[in-house]
Image (cartoon, rainbow, N blue to C red):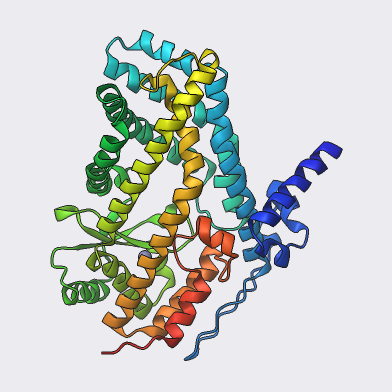
Amino acid sequence: MIWKFYKLTILIILFGIADPAWGQHSSGSTLADSRAKSLTSQDIQQTDTFKPSDYIEVPVASEKTMRYYETGNVWWLVNMILGVLIPGLILFSGFSAKLRNGAQKLGRKWIFIIFFYYALYASVVFAIYLPINYFQGFLRAQAYGLSNQSLLEWFVFNMRSLFISMIRGGFILCGLYLILRLSPRRWWIYAGVAAIPLYFFLNLVHPIWVAPQFNTFTPLENKALEGAILTLAQEAGIEDAQVLQVDKSRQTTTINAYVIGMFNTKQIVLWDTAINNLNEEELKFVMAHEIGHYVENHRLSKTLLSALLIMLTLFFIHHVSHHLIDRFKHRFRFNDLSDVASYPLIVVLFTLASLVTGPINNSYSRYSERQADTFAIDLTGLNHAAATAFVKIQHKNLSNPNPGWMYTIWRETHPPLGERINFFNTYRTEK
Ligand SMILES: [Zn+2]
């Protein structure tokens, strides 16, 4: 009991440091909540208000929203620690070397050994994470009324994700370890460069092979809306886009939209939750925002930035791993980074580096989101609809409109919602 209290106190202190917003809103309910399986959506009253008027006020976050935000921060920290701890244990216990030995028995050829190793590794990690994922991904989402999945649907969804990750991860690992073998000194440069075509390839195949495994994509049912969106796309210079709706309400109640694909797989996708909750003007704004990402070439700039950061991360791994392998090779049971058993070592170092590279990626992402917002207002002049859309999104997605700065730096890929609503209130297009 005392030990439990002690652990909770450490968590509070850690998070007090990690996010100053904690102190402002914490009322003691957070910690109980992070473990409380009895919490139901009825227990949490939603009080976010929505007043349509010319000037749209930034919504005041309800107690439920704040609780979701605060417990989300704790979970982020827990996940970060586990993201180092679990592969670290697999590495230091020599278990990774055992997995490699098992893979060597299953597949004689080098390429199959890598595939089998990754399949074994991913299955072990999946099994370890299953109870944690059950709580975070299922119970927690249910408790906050954000999920529409039954337990079985949730499980099938996760099994499919695991299977896809085994194939994708297997190929990526083959490429990585091949480069490591061919060029033990400069592998980090080649792997960083190879990340660029790889990213484009994954982007190309995602709408064809991956996304349809989870959801059904159909042409937009509302033909008037489809026409309006295609007109917007044409005005912005996009001729061959497909506008689709996806049945995301099978999994979630939250609202979203995105653009994906390249060449003839180019798609503008609206979640059906967006269609069901936003009016036509609001949807037009959301689509104009997505079109903005296209026109401003954010896909390319984000890919180039990511590739650069991956290269720097691999450079860091290249240098640090040699020292660690020299020091701990008897525990690790491998002598060289090009041995596939080193994979958890790469994961640990990658996760640690992401504490630095993550904020850089997030910062650029927020910049590109502001650009897309500006583009969408310039294209449509729908300031009011943009602001009301975000009030609804805040309400539905339980977003904290004014998160703490630590949250913004490490977790926000989008500008805080309050900032976006204020921007729509004040920005006037020059047209
Ligand atoms: Zn965006």
Instruction: Say which residue appears at 46% left-offset and 74% top-offset.
Output: 390
Q: Is residue 5 above or below residue 90?
A: below
Residue 31 relative to residue 89: left or right: right
Instruction: Say which residue appears at 56% left-offset and 40% top-offset.
Output: 133
Is residue 286 visible in this depiction of the protein? no
Location of the C terminus by quadrant is bottom left
- Quadrant of residue 283 within the rendered picture: bottom left
The residue furthest right is 2
- Quadrant of residue 165 within the rendered picture: top left
Instruction: Where is residue 85? Give x, y as percent.
Output: 58, 32
Q: Is residue 284 above or below residue 33?
A: below
Quadrant for ligand 1 reads bottom left
Instruction: Where is residue 247? Give x, y as percent.
Output: 37, 56
Residue 285 relative to residue 139: left or right: left
Residue 188 relative to residue 200: left or right: right
Foreground residue, 217 or 26? 26
